[in-house]
Image (cartoon, helix red, strand yellow):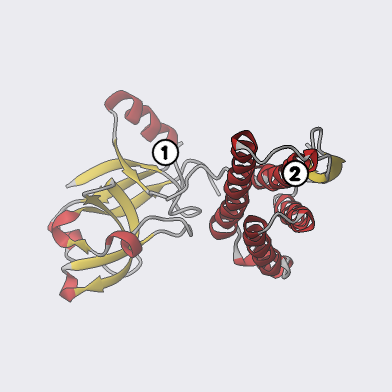
Amino acid sequence: MIFKLFEALDKRFGFERASAHCDIPCGIYDPSGAQIAALTVVRMVDLMAELEAKGGAMDKAFANSMSRYIAVKEEHAEKAKHEIRVIWGDYIKPQHIEKYPQLHEVVHKIMQLGSKSRQTADRDTAVQLVDAVNQFAQIFWETKGVKTKRAKAPYNPPLEMVYPDL
Amino acid sequence: MMRVIKVTGDSLSPEYREGDYVVVATIPFFLNRIQVGDVIVFQQPTYGTLIKKVARVERDGDQFFVVGAHPNSVDSRQFGPIARQALIGRVIWHIPKSIR
């Protein structure tokens, strides 16, 4: 009742505003960016292997393609780490850690695998990165009470991914 | 004397939420008696008019260290304590948007 009165007065006279400012008021967090980035790392490793297997000349066309694959692999491994760090730092709260005590370990594993994926062209490492990011995604959606499902990615590489079952 | 202000943002949530109204007293009688736990409205050079809770009164009442309740609150932990001159008023009446 009193609120309605103030609201009506506000519409009529336009009261001042005071912001209870937050750094991130949007509350939009989603691990899918990290999942796609991790999957891209595997894809780049596959493309590098395919190019090498063609056995052509080590000419400038080869160098150009290979360097592009490497650059994208670098970029997306770092992106996967960044996306996870943001969710971990800004969204994850002590009550989540209490419920999922393995969370810190999963995040640390992602950081390590992301770095190793940049340092090497090892497919197993890149696949492990995808798995670890999927583990994180599963926990993330559980903290929001959203069910998840596992399905193969609808593009190459068709690895099994965790998706929110909306 | 008194000003009515609408709250935007959620850094004082759940006590104060986006859309709530507050009545603030701007007279020295109230401003000279600010204590820890009071909610104040003040001017901040970067963020404009802000509403936060007083966590510490410093320099014999000349500065206030203010915080929000939300972990992502932007407050004195980022921009330092608030000088008395930046004060607009002290909240004396809170009109929440809905009954909680």
Q: Amino acid at mark 1?
A: Ile
The location of residue A66, given as percent across then percent down, is: 64, 42
Q: Quadrant of residue B6?
A: top left
Instruction: Return the residue found at the far top.
Output: A12
The residue where tag 1 is placed is A2
The location of residue B61, given as percent across then percent down, is: 18, 71
Q: Can see residue B33?
A: no
Output the chain of dot 2: A
**Which mark, residue A145?**
none
Sooner in the amino-acid sequence: mark 1 or mark 2: 1
Instruction: Return the residue found at the far bottom.
Output: B60
Name the foreground residue: A62 vs B1.
A62
Badge 1 density bin: few <14, some 14–19, many ≥20, Cα 10 Å: few
The residue where tag 2 is placed is A52
Output the chain of dot 1: A
Badge 2 density bin: few <14, some 14–19, many ≥20, Cα 10 Å: some
Of badges 1 and 2, nearer the viewer stands: 2
Q: Can see residue A1?
A: yes
